[in-house]
Image: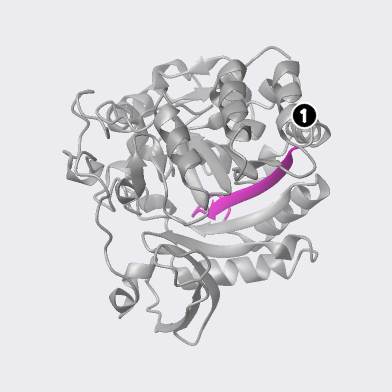
Amino acid sequence: MPQPKYITDINKIQEIPEQDRIKLQQITDKFVFRVNDYYLKLIDWNDPNDPIKKLVIPNEGELSEYGRWDASDEDTNYVVPGCQHKYKTTALLIVSEVCGAYCRYCFRKRLFRNDVKEAMSDVNPGLEYIAEHSEINNVLLTGGDSLILATSKLASILERLRAIEHVKIIRLGSKIPVFNPMRIYEDEQLLETMRKYSTADKRIYVMAHINHPREITEEAKRGFEALHQAGAIVVNQTPILRGINDNPTILAELLDKLSWAGVTPYYFFINRPVAGNRDFVLPLSEVYRIVEQAKARTSGLGKRIRLSMSHTSGKIEILAIENGKAYLKYHQSREDHYGKFMIMDCPKDAAWFDDLPGSEQHWKQPTKRSDTIISVNELPDMPQGRSLTLS
């Protein structure tokens, strides 16, 4: 198949009525827009509530006053430009500020502002930091989308990481397997790179972002298989999103189709309270109920999924919400509170850890490791033009 054509002007999507395009233009002035013609073909334009459309076509709720640009305070995780080190054994390299398309719920919408630059084309400072810290045994390439990089650029980064003996796992954060699966199975150089650097004792994991079972097309399955044959392991993570996958039957179908295709269900996430995301938010108790009902409909393979919140203080797993109480555990922790168990009151409208009464007793706000880091939360609400960086 030919590579998809990318569209960054909402006015070029003729399936959207002109009067709606005019309304959406002001949203794309604030939150960047990008999609491709392959993904647009998955949309049923006759369905006003089509979930695929909601994933990538702007909605007027994005301009509602809600949340923060950086809801998990990632600015406090930067140790050098382009590299975050929040958890002891894991480092993140922010290698791209571009995606195959831009999900409207994205928790890193800040990266696509024209006055912020966190992704670094020069990854040397991050690689040098990782090489100097032997406790780091796995590295996540993310952004943006790591598989949007030119294969030669990606291969160069992988080669450098494989030269660091203590880095055992390399993870590639990507939605390309469903945004543009042809980029995977038609690029033999990419697959050869995977074969070279994903070995029996040092694997590459592709951290896919598949939100709805309709994204798992024949092309997507061909992409999964190409990655599998190249020695990569594919896992999936998705937030639970109002109007997209907040249905036990839909979620169960997603878990089944992932398992059938050999893609490990990894995380269900609570949607972070990020600016522009109000329309996708659900109460914690409702998300827990939906997830448990979905798990009841799938096999043990699908039940491996974990429901968690990527909070400033760590990944907080939701074990149960019953009778107005939330039963939580630190699955990952900035402050080494691994396994810490918490029982907290859970109001019906609580949608995030900070909404739970007494949550502030369990963590403290971190400080930035470098005074040169600019927090996007301190910038004007509307992007001002690229003049500020995080380095």
Above or below 112: residue 293: below
Decide if residue 224 is on the left or right side of residue 377. Answer: right
Decide if residue 257 is on the left or right side of residue 356. Answer: right
Q: Residues within 10 Å of mark 1 (few under 14, many from 20)?
A: some
Q: Residue at x 58, y 24 (%)?
A: 154
Give the magenta-colored segment's residue range.
232-245
Quarter of the image with the C terminus is: top left
Q: Residue at x 53, y 72 (%)?
A: 318
Residue 160 part of the magenta-drawn span: no
User: Which quarter of the picture shows residue 24?
Assistant: top left
Pick the front one: 211 or 76: 76
**Residue 375: image x %, image y %?**
23, 43
Quarter of the image with the N terminus is: top right
* Amino acid, disc 1: Arg
**Residue 334: image x %, image y %?**
41, 62
**Residue 51: image x %, image y %?**
56, 43
Above or below 324: residue 301: above
